[in-house]
Image (spheres, helix red, strand yellow):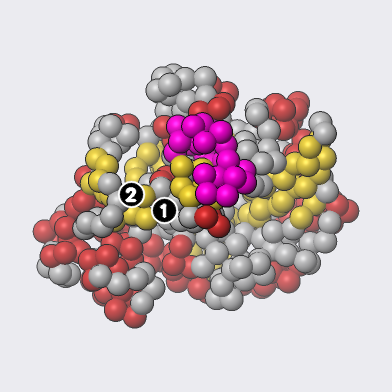
Amino acid sequence: MRIIADLHLHSKFSRATSREMDVETLARWCGLKGITVVGTGDFTHPVWLRELRAKLRPNGKGLYTHGSQHFMLSTEVSGIYPQSGRLRKIHTILLAPSFEVVDRVNAVLSRFGSLMADGRPTLSLPCDKLVEYVMEISPECMAIPAHVWTPWFSLYGSNSGFDSLRECFGDQTRHIHAVETGLSSDPPMNWRIAELDSVMLVSNSDAHSAPKLGREANVFDCALDYGEILGALRRRDRSKFLFTIEFFPEEGKYHFDGHRACNQRLSPKETRAARGVCPACGKPLTVGVMSRVEALASREDGAGPTRVPFRHLIPLEEIIAEALGTQPGGSAVREEYLALTSALANEFAILMDVPLDEIARHTRPRVVEGIRRVREGRVQIRPGYDGVFGEIHLFGGAAEERRVEDRQAAQTTLF
């Protein structure tokens, strides 16, 4: 069966996260989105873990359910520690097969930082030791480096990361079977890094509010079984791991270089010309994902082994909002969104599968045209930089239009 999985998100116990990120809200929005398996997030937080125990039931195959919604036990931890003369700040996703295993993981991690302080705890624990301890507790666990290109708090981050998997994880690299590309990069950017040929590229929403669920996700063809899902990643099984759903990476808030305080947004070429400093004030620029990929890339075009395909999408609420000339999350947008998902199917089915003429029976022509343009990759993008999300438009605006057929070539065999 086709499974859409979003395994990285945060609960109401994480900083800067909606107070509505509880089990019931997650289950409701997963139904609207079409997400089959969702991560719990934050299993390290004692109060959230107690709530998960009370509201979830085991399905007997390593997953848990609330009503018809399936959950996978997941968390993200922040490791901050010195190594080789630099302070490293790395986020890692952890997946676990049972509450019993989670209890043992939490008992170990609590020695390195307060688990109560935040849903995403800060630990004084190097990444290699983190993976070693977790895998000793249970070989069924999985550690996935999170949003690996973000300038702050990531494996390859320009400000506090490393230049390679082995530099970060040492001999524990053998347990790293997947990396999360993050919102500011997409698979073709990662294909330029030869060492990533040995792992799967996964995509998740890192959602802090329910409407953001599924903005990136993974699509499997397997049973609702923890072992089968993780097995597809460990074996790099392209018959089971079908494709990823991606943001347009330019929309991510660290795609280009820049300096937010001076409203300076620079491409890698412009950054080199500016010698890495802000043209307005002379302070160092925040080096974004594109520049960092170019610095570490061993290939120009990502040539290499056959890989899992991908598909760029824009969330349905954003399409509706632009069609209506308003902002996502407003009452008119939410009303149209709920009407469409009620009349037709879930959001992913509407974005990818439902024929346009069928959609046209239930909404206005401009919304249908927006969905058509997303399917064709006809978007206008102004890249994000230094913590500022990029601007993406379907119906005009100041940004340059960029046809993305070339970057979507990997999708055509599937779609």
Q: Quadrant for residue 360, please give it.
A: bottom left
Q: Is residue 40 left or right of residue 309?
A: right
Above or below 206: residue 246: above
The local crowd at label 1, few if under 14, some if 14 to 19, many if 20 or more residues have their Cα within 10 Å, is many
Q: Which amino acid does label 1 sit on?
A: Gly
Q: How many marks?
A: 2
Q: State which region is magenta.
A: 267-293
The image shows residue 305 at horizontal and vertical percentages of 44, 20
Along the viewing direction, whichever of 255 and 237 lies nearer the viewer: 255
Check if residue 18 falls in the magenta segment. Answer: no
Whole-percent x and y of residue 411?
30, 36
Tag 1–tag 2 contact (CB < 8 Å): yes
Upstream in sequence: badge 1 or badge 2: 2
Query: Vertically, is 264 above or below 296?
Result: below
The residue most toward the right is: 111
Q: Mark 1 points at which residue?
A: 390
SS type, badge 1: loop
The secondary element bearing badge 2 is classed as strand
Residue under the point 42% across and 45% down: 249
Residue at 56% x, 33% y is: 275
Q: Residue at x 26, y 57 (%)?
A: 397
Within the image, what quadrant is residue 23 found in? bottom right
**Label 2 crowd bin: few (<14), some (14–19), many (20+), radius 10 Å:** many
Establish if 156 lies above or below 339: above
Kind of residue indicated by mark 2: Ile
* Closer to the camera in the image, 177 or 15: 15
Q: Is residue 305 visible?
A: no
The dot on residue 121 is none
Residue extending farthest to the bottom is 331
Examine the rendering and report whether any part of residue 381 can be seen.
Answer: yes
The residue carrying mark 2 is 381
Q: Where is residue 253 in the image (x, y as percent from the top left)?
A: 49, 52
